[in-house]
Amino acid sequence: MTYQIKGIRRIKLRSIKTGLLLLNCQFLCTLLNILPAAAATEPTISVVQSRENTSQWQGITNRLESAGVNYCVISLNNIRSSADWGSRTVLFLPNVEKLTPSQAITLEEWVNKGGRVIASGPVGSLSAPGVRRLMQNILGGYWGFSLDTPEKLQLSSNKLQKWASSDKLMGEVRGGVVVPDDTNQTAAVWNNKDNSAAVLASDRSTFFGWRWGVDTAANPQLDSAWLQAALKRHTTPSTITSVPGGSPTCANSVAENPNSTPNNSPSSFNITAVVPNNPLPNINFRRSDELSDEPIDHLQDSVRLDIQADSRKPISSNEAIVLQQELLKLIGRVESSNLASAAINPGIQSAKAQSAEFASTQPGALTVNSQQAISQANVIVKQIPQLVAQKKYAEARKQWLTAKASLWNQFPVSRKLAQPEIRAIWLDRGTIVNARNEQGLAQVFDRLSQAGINTVFFETVNAGYTVYPSKVAPQQNPLTRNWDPLKSAVKLAHARNMELHAWVWVFAAGNQRHNQILNIDSNYPGPVLAAHPDWAGYDKRGKMIPQGQNKPFFDPANPQLRQYLLNQYQEIVTNYDVDGLHLDYIRYPFQDDRRNLSYGYGQAARSQFKQSYGVDPMQISPTQTDLWQKWTAFRTQQIDSFVAQVSQKMRQQKPDLIMSVAVFPLPEQERIQKLQQHWEVWANRGDIDLIVPMTYALDTSAFSRLAQPWILSRKLGSALLVPGIRLLNLPTLGAFDQIQLIRDLPVGGYALFAAENLQNQQLQQVFNSTQGQAQQDPIPYRQPFKTAALRYTSLQKEWEFVLQNKQLQMSNTGISEFNAQAEILQNALNQLANSPSTANLQTTKASLTRFQSQFRTLMRQHALNNSYQVGVWENRLATIERLISFGERKNKKS
């Protein structure tokens, strides 16, 4: 513990025992006139220790102490949520080269709450592509490559970087080139012919282009000077804040690494400050009594970016940054979609090249109108902070919305641009009922086929009823009697080269809304529970339907119920030529332990749990931590084991059956507590082929925030991720924007909810034009190797296009090397697609890994001008990698 002494700089009292700490402090402080180091000397910076910088820790801590920095240490291993990054204003990541997707996501959340980051060295360079992209967004650039020899630091002449003006900041350093997203963020450059960036500084971060704290990289005085300058710019009186929701816990040493040098800095305190508004808060449900039928309906509420033009509400600096980022991302999506379209349709592009629409001094994919819209949007991006500083909040919002609308109108919605991808849609019971017969259903499938849909999740079991005449289920849905919609759907889909997957409600047994449609008692639990009431699940109050919801659920622990469901699915798979089985409601109802709202107390579950643990789960509560964890694990296991059982049994009947699940996009541990739905386990075991998270949102930023954790996740094994998009109330260009986001990320497709919302003629026309049936592409989960080869061919077309238009920033030597490496990978992918074998698979994987590792270096110059597009290309290479992994697993099983 460190204390401040009047007239003396500091002394360290190392012998105070923990049990007498407070008493001894009071006594000694009075006796020696020692004042505890409070706000003035409390830690204002948290330093992250990771596996990569542990060997450098002595040098790092020596420099921190010589710089007089008050700090504490956070172990990267302990990061589970955004709160774990701490409540201090500034976080220092010295040479942290590898972060997991979840760590990167929580760091972004922490920064969006007002945290500031100082980083050094090749930050995140050993991480997954999606993580590197996230870190680039946070740091305003990325580590490009190491320099071969030491170079002298030269301060930037940029007037926006006045903080970096001291002579102490100049000297010789062995470092690397950092590639900025915006040249205005360059605070120092290397004194070489390229004057490449050495230090980046954005509103949210400062990024040193060398390994800070390493003697062979820079001398201690230079390191200390740069840290002091960076810390000063991030902790001025106008910017210093505590981070809301951050934990004040920050250790003096790292428990996981007892060999590290302990930090004897003061104990940590919260910094008193104004808490900034959080424009994109963490995901939290509303109170359970406010929930409508579906908790999923409210998932987007806490992550939406609502911009109202007439609002005069103040915009915080953090919100201004978010507005800038979202507009820049939209610019990237517009440019990316136009490039894809131009590369796929070279004939159309060249035919229009002489027209006024495409007249430009800079040849390329964009029309004059598009160039103007993007230029104006870039101007607005720069104006937003100025308008906020002038308190012109309504004007800032108005300009932002104007730019967004203008950019949306630049999407190439009248030309083909889709690559081979999963294009799925849920065909709902209402649409089936309204079709009335096979002829009416044929019209539905015609529309879907024209729109380029290749996978249909056909609602087959709903609220306990089957849509087809069943010998297993007690009752066919009264609304579909006198015909067999499932039989018709299979025939109609296959005639149009589409796949038909039977969509079944698993543990949701009934639906009060459906009862109203049938004009029966609203409390009717559905035909299955009516016949077998002992199969029901209950909440802790003994109610079959949870409070605030409208569906009774089965008890997943009941063996008779499980066998009934298996028999039902076997009937579907055996009697109908379905291509897949799509599991919905494969969970317990939504719960909230904080309000004593829990579920799963069916007769079988209570009996089995009591037999295993000696206590009725009705008698335990969340305060009994150990027992409650066992109860949660017990329920989670019921779902996990049933998924495995269904997958095994159905694939025995039909080995090529595609298994998919509709799941909640909640954080893993929160989802287990509230729904007992642990779909990462199902994916890792290989039980499931397609994970379809219901990432429903009305704006693209919220959609991205819901989908991003799973897109970056490494916990899905070789399963393919297919994010869900809800069309209800979504404008046509908003839907296209969300689809374009998916196409720019390492994802192989999307799923639309639902067919009943595809009545919008404008949306239908956009789908017909951009992804319609002009060509029959392979479906990724059915032909993964062929899909990978075709998607790579599309990538090459984009590279060829920018080369032909002299837009690829690369030397002639670099272009030759790039083309040679790209051709090697193309040949390997084609050979694997035409002749799948172990040898060809290994050759392709090696070629792809080699190309991915070289890609960023080869593209470093181009990334200076278009980092978004380079990131998109990296993501598409990652998609190819996932397709190959999926194909490898499928081939092993076959």
Image (spheres, rainbow, N blue to C red):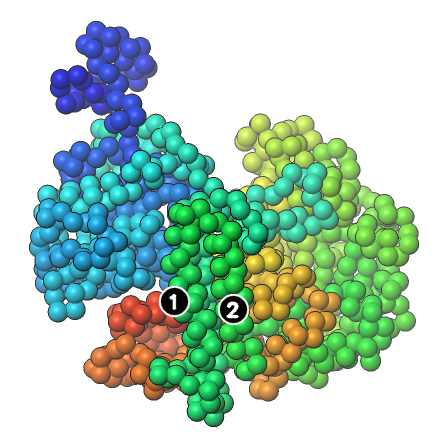
Q: Is residue 431 above or below residue 824?
A: above
The answer, for residue 196, to whether it is visible in the render is yes
Spatial separation of the CA atoms under disc 2 and disc 1 = 19 Å
Element assignment for label 1: helix
Which residue is drawn at the image coordinates 59% and 57% (left, top)? 697
User: Relative to the observer, which residue lies in front, 279 or 477?
Assistant: 279
Q: Secondary structure at mark 2?
A: helix
Q: Residue at 13%, 57% (x, y): give it.
A: 154
Residue 287, image x and y in percent? 65, 38
Residue contact at pointers 2 and 1, CB within 8 angstroms: no
Residue in the image at 28% along x and 32% along y: 43
Q: Is residue 383 left or right of residue 442?
A: left
Q: Disc 2 designates what residue?
A: 406
- Residue 81: quadrant of the picture: top left
In this rendered view, identify the residue nearer to me: 853 or 88. 88
> x%, y% of residue 385?
39, 52
Query: Counting residues from the N terminus, which is met first, the one under dot 2 or under dot 1?
Result: 2
- Name the kind of residue labelled 2 in the image: Ser
Binning the other alpha carbons within 10 Å of mark 1 as few (below 14), some (14 to 19) or many (20 upward) gives many
The N terminus, quarter of image: top left
Q: Is residue 341 left or right of residue 659?
A: left
The C terminus lies in which quarter of the figure?
bottom right
Q: Which residue is mark 1?
A: 868
Q: Position of residue 824 (x, y in %)?
A: 32, 83
Q: Nearer the viewer, mark 2 or mark 1?
A: 2
Decide if residue 94 is on the left or right side of residue 702. Answer: left
Count residues near mark 2 (Cα–Cα under 10 Å), then give few for <14, some for 14-19, many for 20+.
some
